[in-house]
Amino acid sequence: MEPSKYFSEYFDTMYSSLSSIDASKLAEAAEIIWQCSESGKKVMVVGNGGSAAMASHVAVDLTKAAGIRAVAFNDADLLTCFANDYGYEEWVVEALNAYEDAG
């Protein structure tokens, strides 16, 4: 595919995706994250595949830029250990249980 056509289609897709975002849902998510931080809790972010890298980026941005405690569960050792012991379908639940705050 010609580069200019590729980029044109890519930006069209990005525009379409961004245009379909419900801003009220983003505001709702932001409020939940803020309440979590205000109550002394941490935000736990999970992703699969390429989304694991995005989860890590979000956790770092929340921590560094917003001062919100956040952790991402995309460490290969943690993921494979929990997946081996509890199954791929349950590893996230077990990781959340291991790192959750009381209350």
Image (cartoon, rainbow, N blue to C red):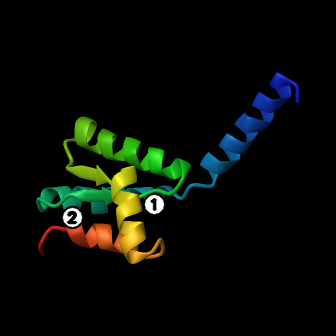
Residue named by callout 2: 99
On screen, residue 89 versus residue 13, left or right, reads left
Q: Residues within 10 Å of mark 1 (few under 14, many from 20)?
A: few
Q: Nearer the viewer's eye, disc 2 or disc 1? A: 2
Q: Where is residue 94 shown, x and y percent of the image? A: 31, 73
Q: Is residue 52 above or below residue 44?
A: above
At x 66%, y 41%, the residue is: 14
Kindly identify the residue that appears in the image at 26 percent across and 36 percent down. 65
Does residue 16 appear left or right of residue 68 in this picture? right
Assign the C terminus to one quadrant of the image.
bottom left
Residue 95 position in % (x across, y down): 30, 67
Q: Nearer the viewer, residue 29 or 64?
A: 64
Using residue 6 as the reference point, say whether residue 31 is left or right of it: left
Q: Residue at x 20, y 50 (%)?
A: 69
Quarter of the image with the N terminus is top right
**Quick one: SS at disc 2?**
helix
Q: Position of residue 34 (x, y in %)?
A: 24, 56
Depicted 54 relative to depicted 36: above or below: above
Is the residue under label 1 in contact with that under label 2 (CB below 8 Å)?
Answer: no
Is residue 6 among what the camera can see? yes
Q: Please report whichever mark, 2 or 1, sits nearer to the chain's N-terminal start.
A: 1
Relative to residue 88, is residue 80 depicted above or below?
above
Query: What amino acid is found at the position of numbered circle 1 in the picture?
Result: Ser
What is the distance, in whole Å, between disc 2 and disc 1 at their CAs? 29 Å
Residue 38 lies in quadrant: bottom left
Q: Which residue is mark 1?
A: 24
Query: Residue 6: which numbered mark, if any?
Result: none
Whether residue 88 is situated above or below residue 34 in the rendered picture: below
